[in-house]
Image (cartoon, rainbow, N blue to C red):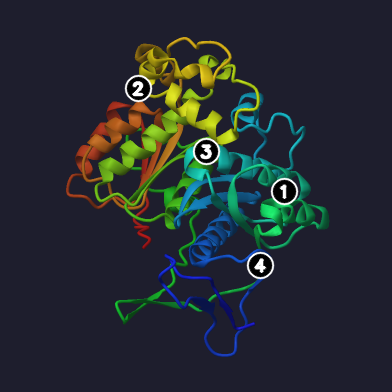
Amino acid sequence: MKELELKYGCNPNQKPSKIAMQGEKELPITVLSGKPGYINFLDAFNGWQLVKELKEATGLPAATSFKHVSPAGAAVGLPLDETLAKIYWVDDLGELSPLACAYARARGADRMSSFGDFISLSDVCDVATAKIIKREVSDGVIAPGYEPEALEILKQKKKGNYNIIQIDPDYVPASIEHKEVFGITFEQGRNELAINNELLANVVTENKKIPDEAKIDLIISLITLKYTQSNSVCYAKGGQAIGIGAGQQSRIHCTRLAGTKADNWFLRQSPKVLGLKFVDNIGRADRDNAIDLYIGDDYMDVLADGAWENIFKEKPEVFTREEKRAWLDQMTDVALGSDAFFPFGDNIERAHKSGVKYVAQPGGSVRDDNVICTCNKYNMAMAFTGIRLFHH
């Protein structure tokens, strides 16, 4: 099959729409279920590249949760501790495979953004991973293969219309890529840069120590940024992205946005949040939204107007700003990657509030000295990669 007709393009009025291969080549995918659309395929192909590179860089199964051509989460298959299993809502599933752990992490880091995601898996989808996917609101999945039982589980979603794509893991695209905008064709070489420890060798701060675990997190952040709409920054910890700021015009806005997501990820692990008692049969999305509201600054309004009775079995205690700050002060050893240089030290100041200890960025700003000085103030270790990772 050299081309596949789609229902429509980015919007219903954009017809006709298709994906196609040039020349005699066949499409490297097979649609096993559903009818993926234009944006689905953009998410699928970007996500597949991301997880393929994560697997190659770390040797671990990888997963990503994509929304509107940027990842909401990305992770490798490290085991989950009891707290993470609980906040990712997989503690009832027993022992999980490494691939299932990777997707639980990718989905769970920012559940609000992952709602209705497109999933990419580096390895053959197994039953444990399919069981997690089945109960989440998702548009589809791409993987190099599916275990027979896992495929049957996934085919039960959306009354048999769930989008399931199998991709040839050996497919290698052409080295030159093209894009058409306003009737004009753009051409460039593919970004085939390999992201590995060599990019982290030029540590420019007084603190030169970046442990192996932090190097993995920095590599995860940089590979994630390679497929995130720019400007972008990514906070990572424990083998996963915990906060991604995408598509902002100002880098400090990226850093703040991603930092707030990282903070929310850690706040959800606090005893106050873990102790919330929800009403029976509450929907997964309603529960997730309630948690985000509870850890936000406007929850007093909900307590005051009595709306909590529709969510919780008992009125929860207020999570004060002072209590939240005290909990966040326990978050340490976070890694931060940036797709272009930090122009001011304010980005580092904001990163410090979210426990960042390790930084990787291209360098090259006229104010590099100021950024380095700010890192030194907090004993951070920062590597200049010399490589920009813009993605559009």
Between the C-alphas of marks 3 and 4, the distance is: 28 Å
Mark 3 or mark 2: which is in front?
Answer: 2
Instruction: Of the two numbered discs 3 and 1 on the same chain, state the one appearing first in sequence.
Output: 3
* Crowd rating for badge 2 (residues with CA inside 10 Å; few <14, some 14–19, many 20+): few
Mark closer to the observer (3, 4) = 3
User: Residue 103: where, in percent of width, then height?
Assistant: 62, 45
Nearer to us of marks 4 and 1 is 1
Label 2–label 1 contact, CB within 8 A = no
Q: Can residue 26 be seen in this view?
A: yes
Q: Which mark is residue 111?
A: 3
Does 109 appear above or below 385? Answer: above
- Tell me how far mark 3 sits from mark 2, CA to CA: 19 Å
Decide which of 147, 337 is in the foreground and name it. 147
Residues packed near mark 3 inside 10 Å, few (<14), some (14 to 19) or many (20 plus): many
Q: Which of 328 and 378 is in front in this view?
A: 328
| Position of the C terminus by quadrant | bottom left
The residue beneath circle 4 is: 169
Residue with the mark numbered 2: 298
Percent position of residue 155, x then y: 73, 56
User: Which numbered disc flags the more N-terminal residue, 2 or 4?
Assistant: 4
Instruction: Give me the disc on residue 130.
Output: 1
Q: In this view, does 324 lie to the left or right of 130?
A: left
Q: Please provide percent x and percent y for residue 63.
A: 60, 50
What is the spatial separation of the Cα atoms under label 2 and label 1, in whole angstroms?
36 Å
User: What is the distance, in whole Å, between disc 4 and disc 1 at their CAs?
Assistant: 19 Å
Q: What element carries label 1?
A: helix
Q: Are marks 3 and 2 in contact (CB under 8 Å)?
A: no
Q: How crowded is mark 1: few (under 14 residues within 10 Å), some or many (20 or more)?
A: many
Q: Compute the Cα span from label 2 to label 4.
A: 47 Å
